[in-house]
Image: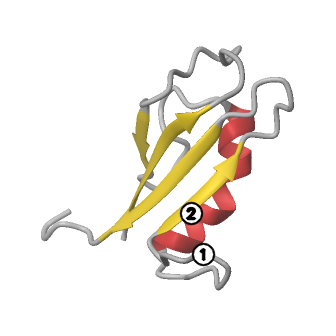
Amino acid sequence: YTVTIKLVANNRPCWAGHQIGQEWTFENMTPAGMCASAWHAVYPYVLTMSAGGVFPWQDDPDVMVVSCPDSQVQNIFELRRSLRKAGA
């Protein structure tokens, strides 16, 4: 599966410069330009979703919401899983 990471909300501007609406696609490594703290928070979920795993507490098995650990900024990321395109 392909997992897209999108910044959907925050309480303050991100010190790493991430902007609401910014997106990254997981391609087996840290997405270019993504803050290491945010990546550390989302990685276990991204890896699980990319392998087809689910989280039973989520209403939609293809969507997960994860927060950055920076308590001052509180970036909220939406992880969305989709099928890989043929040949990808």
Q: Which residue is drawn at 59% across and 14% down?
A: 17
In what element is the residue under mark 2? strand
> Tags 1 and 2 in contact by the CB under 8 Å rule?
yes
Location of mark 1 (residue): 58
Mark seen at residue 64:
2
Q: In this view, does 53 lie above or below 28?
A: below
Amino acid type of the residue that numbered disc 2 sits on in the rendered structure: Met
Distance between the Cα atoms at labels 1 and 2?
7 Å
- 35 or 57, nearer to the observer: 57
Where residue 22 sits: x, y (%)? Answer: 43, 30
Q: In this view, does 10 lie above or below 24?
A: above
- 30 or 49, nearer to the observer: 49
The quarter of the picture where residue 11 lies is: top right
Quadrant in which the C terminus appears:
bottom left
Where residue 86 sits: x, y (%)? Answer: 13, 70
- 88 or 53, nearer to the observer: 53
Q: Is residue 49 left or right of residue 41?
A: left
Amino acid type of the residue that numbered disc 1 sits on in the rendered structure: Gln
* Mark closer to the chain start, 1 or 2: 1
- 46 or 9, nearer to the observer: 9
